[in-house]
Image (cartoon, rainbow, N blue to C red):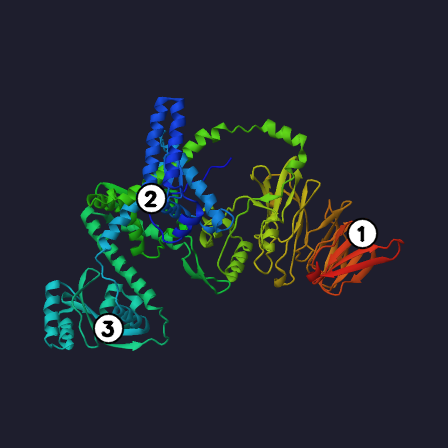
């Protein structure tokens, strides 16, 4: 029995489907029908007991009153309440399309309406019980509440901002496509800055200011030479000022690095390469973001001054050095040259001895590096800020340093009493209450015993022959070129989980480090994904059911089938191998035989031929078996993508260069090899004492199985044979690129017969 999902129901009205819901989804009861039903219910309850009758009459009166006020807008009435269109729409639109019940529009909504009623009935029962939240649930509610309060404060601070105008958008376009030739003059004190600004405003030439600076030096001011700057090289506030000026104009006094500064604009010139700027809507959105960022920074500075927040620069530099070791969110892949966006930012690695260093103080409170890591560790990786310089690091530290002061200010403004905020918190509590009620009242009644299941299995083993399942990890990216690059990094030794943390854009699997849950064989529309998930070997080795997987980083890994526990791993590449020349990946499926695992490595066929390795591994051992578990290593094989076949103690290993190797399965000694003169993509079939194998030229060879090579026959199938021959129902099925052949011996027993079907006819 699974837990029912909790759908939040609030009073927000969403436009759409009101007519459908009111008219055709559920025929709403008339007032007369409602009253009659209520009277009948009240009468039956009266017959049972007088106290119950009184309660029923009260409920009947409430339901009748609700029907009278809502009229035909009621979708459903149940004991103690009703469902209205706004309740339904609010819950319906919270579901993603895959979560909605199956069926046509009407059937799907009817099914969901029943679940809404069930949920409200459960909620009504849950409210009768005392709710005791778990620590995790309490923490989740508190985090949500604090975030909503802070969001409300920010809305309050920015509600007076004037929206960007078309003129602002035009200035922004100019900023993106022009360079400004400017001089910055930074004065020692504000009084002399105001004096010189007044002189320049009344016509004093700028050369007089230069002469004064030459005489007095830094005691008066420092001035740089005329230089061209781009808008993105200076703070947004200064860029806005410069691109609002006219050539030859001197700005008002600005605070730049907390020092009085005036700017002289000489001219603008076009950039060498024009920059494409989006539509006005997008431009105004970016400008709006700049406005809000300025408000946020100004308020942050005010809070820092108010609370007396200080930083420890030496310890901040230690933390910054660790942050800079992380790869940037926006980058260029070194292998492909393609731009890369890393959605997920990991936490920096900090030595244990450094975690206690104090990076900031607020009054008597100290904030350590450990506090910083703990705070940002609770934030989803894709929501963490990128820290590449001291300013952004200080902002990230202030998120936890100034958080209490921010919350106190919001409460002082009464923002913690907002009805919408309380509604969200109440809905979360109700969801937890329903879950607790469901677990306590329903789940607690379900008793499953291992003994009963074993008895059922022994009585009907076929019942357990379900489809195979796996619990894979997925790394979903938005470009094939990036996928190829990450595949190369896996082969070079990167770990799959680390790449998921950095690159995955899938909201379903990314927070779970790529785990996709249980997946059934045959459930994937993508054939390559299906093959990748189920290209594993499963068998009993040393009395333990093992799942053995050859992975893209060149390692073979084994897991306990019942629990998923790691058992052992084996690196199929020499330690001095280098991708892509000598380090390979694993494409073939491992073979389990006599408590051993057999596997050969290779690369994508598009990478061509190269050095390969075949191994026999003692899979009864545990841990890293690269040395301790090696039974034998055959290094005369080339890259292979084929799964070997084992028969009578002999293993038949094809490689992509076109050679079939026959080895002793116990010793790895090569007994013979056969040259197919073309690349081999498929795997060998051993049946009836014969070895069947196809190649890229379309040839299929039949050899005698055994320690001595003997070619029995060869035939050409007219185009490439990439697959493995399959025997069934007295025939041998072989498929080339566009045809399927069924080969069988004629009834006379001597002449083979053949039929074929094109792919379009199968």
Q: Earlier in the sequence, mark 3 or mark 2?
A: 2
Residue 706 picture location, percent across and down:
81, 50
Q: Nearer the viewer, residue 574 or 134?
A: 134
Left or right? Give the position of 670 relative to 185.
right
Residue 97 lies left or right of residue 397; in this view the side is: right
Residue 169 in percent (x, y) is at: 28, 69
**Tag nearer the camera, 1 or 3:** 1
- Under circle 2, the secondary element is helix
Q: On the picture, is 732 further left or further right than 635?
A: right
> 517 or 557, which is in the foreground?
517
Residue beneath disc 3? 182
Residue 25 image point, x, y percent: 44, 47
Q: Disc 3 to disc 2, how far (Cα)?
A: 68 Å
* Residue at mark 2: 70
Evaluate whether residue 99 shows in this view: no
Dot 1 or dot 2: first in sequence order is: 2
Q: Residue at x 34, y 43 (%)?
A: 370
Query: Upstream in the sequence, badge 1 or badge 3?
Result: 3
Q: Is residue 485 above or below residue 433?
A: below
Please provide percent x and percent y for residue 519.
56, 46
Left or right: where does residue 166 sit relative to residue 510? left
Could you tell me which secondary element the residue under label 1 belongs to? Answer: strand
**Which dot, 1 or 2, sits closer to the camera?**
2
How packed mark 3 is, by other alpha carbons closer than 10 Å (few <14, some 14-19, many 20 or more), is many
Work out whether 24 lies above or below 250.
above
Q: Nearer the viewer, residue 604 or 505?
A: 505
Q: How many marks?
A: 3
Tell me what residue is drawn at x 81 percent, y 60 percent. Answer: 714
* Residue where numbered disc 1 is placed: 690
Instruction: State if disc 2 and disc 1 touch (CB < 8 Å).
Output: no
Report the disc number at residue 335: none
- The answer for how far apart the CA atoms under marks 1 and 3 are is 85 Å
């Amino acid at each position: 029995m699974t837990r029912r999902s909790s759908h939040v129901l609030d009073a927000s009205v969403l436009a759409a489907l009101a007519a459908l819901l009111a008219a055709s989804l559920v025929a709403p009861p008339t007032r007369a029908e409602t009253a009659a039903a209520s009277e009948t219910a009240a009468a039956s309850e009266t017959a049972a007991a007088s106290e119950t009758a009184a309660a029923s009459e009260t409920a009947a009166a409430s339901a009748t009153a609700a029907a009278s006020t809502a009229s035909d807008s009621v979708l459903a009435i149940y004991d103690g309440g009703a469902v209205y269109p706004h309740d339904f729409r609010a819950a319906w639109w919270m579901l993603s399309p895959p979560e909605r019940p199956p069926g046509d529009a009407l059937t799907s909504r009817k099914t969901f309406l029943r679940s809404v009623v069930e949920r409200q009935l459960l909620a009504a029962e849950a409210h009768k019980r005392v709710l005791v939240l778990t620590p995790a649930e309490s923490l989740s509610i508190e985090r949500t509440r604090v975030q909503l309060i802070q969001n409300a404060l920010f809305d309050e601070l920015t509600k007076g901002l004037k929206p960007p105008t078309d003129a602002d958008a035009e200035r922004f376009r100019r900023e993106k496509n022009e360079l400004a030739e400017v001089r910055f003059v930074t004065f020692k004190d504000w009084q002399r800055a105001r004096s010189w600004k007044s002189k320049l405003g009344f016509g004093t030439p700028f050369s007089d200011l230069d002469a004064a600076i030459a005489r007095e030096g830094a005691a008066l001011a420092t001035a740089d030479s005329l230089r061209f700057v781009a808008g993105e090289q200076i703070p947004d506030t200064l860029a806005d000022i410069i691109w609002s000026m006219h050539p030859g104009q001197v700005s008002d006094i600005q605070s730049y690095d907390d020092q009085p500064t005036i700017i002289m604009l000489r001219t603008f010139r076009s950039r060498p390469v024009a920059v494409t700027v989006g539509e006005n809507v997008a431009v105004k959105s970016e400008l709006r973001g700049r406005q809000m960022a300025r408000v946020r920074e100004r308020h942050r500075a005010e809070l820092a001054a108010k609370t007396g927040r200080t930083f420890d620069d030496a310890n901040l530099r230690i933390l910054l050095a660790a942050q800079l070791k992380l790869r940037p969110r926006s980058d260029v892949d070194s292998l492909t040259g393609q731009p890369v966006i890393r959605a997920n930012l990991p936490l920096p690695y900090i030595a244990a001895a450094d975690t206690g260093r104090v990076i900031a103080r607020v009054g008597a409170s100290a904030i350590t590096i450990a506090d910083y890591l703990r705070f940002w560790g609770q934030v989803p990786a894709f929501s963490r800020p990128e820290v590449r310089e001291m300013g952004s690091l200080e902002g990230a530290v202030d998120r936890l340093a100034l958080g209490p002061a921010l919350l106190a200010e919001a409460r002082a403004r009464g923002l913690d009493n907002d009805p919408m905020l309380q509604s969200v918190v109440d809905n979360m509590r109700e969801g937890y209450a329903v879950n607790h009620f469901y677990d306590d009242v329903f789940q607690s009644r379900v008793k499953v015993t291992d003994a009963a299941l074993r008895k059922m299995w022994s009585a009907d083993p076929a019942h357990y022959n379900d489809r195979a399942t796996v619990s894979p990890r997925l790394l979903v990216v938005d470009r094939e070129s990036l996928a190829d690059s990450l595949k190369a990094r896996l082969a070079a030794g990167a770990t799959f989980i680390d790449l998921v943390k950095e690159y995955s854009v899938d909201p379903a699997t990314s927070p779970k480090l790529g785990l996709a849950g249980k997946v059934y064989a045959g459930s994937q529309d993508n054939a390559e994904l299906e093959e990748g998930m189920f290209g594993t070997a499963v068998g009993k080795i040393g009395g333990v059911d093992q799942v053995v997987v050859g992975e893209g980083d060149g390692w073979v890994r084994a897991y306990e089938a019942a629990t998923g526990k790691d058992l052992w791993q084996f690196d199929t590449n020499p330690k001095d191998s280098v991708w892509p020349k000598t380090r390979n990946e694993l494409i073939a499926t491992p073979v389990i035989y006599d408590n051993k695992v057999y596997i050969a490595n290779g690369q994508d066929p598009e990478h061509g031929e190269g050095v390969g390795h075949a191994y026999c591994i003692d899979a009864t051992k545990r841990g890293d078996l690269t040395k301790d578990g090696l039974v034998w290593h055959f290094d005369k094989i080339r890259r292979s993508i084929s799964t070997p076949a084992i028969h009578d103690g002999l293993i038949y290993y094809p490689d992509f260069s076109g050679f079939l190797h026959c080895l002793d399965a116990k010793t790895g000694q090569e007994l013979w090899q056969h040259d197919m003169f073309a690349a081999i993509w498929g795997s060998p079939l051993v049946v009836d004492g014969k070895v069947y194998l196809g190649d890229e030229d379309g040839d299929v060879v039949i050899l005698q199985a055994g320690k001595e090579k003997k070619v029995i026959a060869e035939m050409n199938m007219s185009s490439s044979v990439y697959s493995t021959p399959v025997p069934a129902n007295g025939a041998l099925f072989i498929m080339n690129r566009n045809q399927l052949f069924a080969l069988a011996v004629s009834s006379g027993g001597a002449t083979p017969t053949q039929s074929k079907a094109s792919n379009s006819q199968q």
